[in-house]
Amino acid sequence: MKIDLITKEDLADFKIQLIEEIKALLQPQKNMQKKWLRSAEVRKMLNISPGTLQNLRINGMLPFTKVGSIAYYEITDIEKMMQKGGENVQLVRKIK
């Protein structure tokens, strides 16, 4: 019969490996980006006022979905607006 002995060093190594694996599992959750943002999050992200955000909605420059009384914006739509540059970004800068 074979007997395997576990030393304190083995346990310390196991502890380090276990902690690293747990950190790796939790990492994607920290970096996971939301798909939908609320108005306050969009205003903070773009550093704009509520009125500016409302103008972007009214002018159709930033699509949104309303659920009850809350407007939600897809992060991809915000990124598209920012990447387009030109008129959309100039308008945001003028209104700020």
Image (cartoon, rainbow, N blue to C red):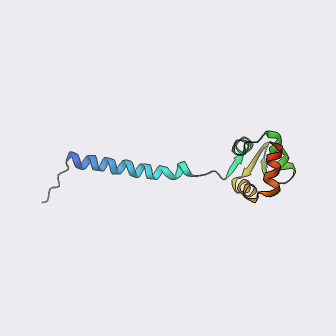
Residue visible at 14% across and 59% down? 2
Q: Is residue 28 left or right of residue 48?
A: left
Report x, y in % for residue 76. 70, 57
Whether residue 62 appears in this view of the structure is no
Report x, y in % for residue 80. 73, 58
Q: Quadrant of the N terminus?
A: bottom left
As drawn, 74 above or below 95: below
Nearest the eye: 64 or 81? 81
Residue visible at 31% across and 47% down? 15
Residue 44 falls in which quadrant of the image? top right
Residue visible at 70% across and 47% down? 37
Q: Quadrant of the C terminus?
A: top right
Whether residue 95 appears in this view of the structure is yes
Residue placed furthest toward the left = 1
Residue 49 falls in which quadrant of the image? top right
Report x, y in % for residue 43. 74, 42
Nearest the eye: 90 or 41? 90
Q: Is residue 68 left or right of residue 2?
A: right
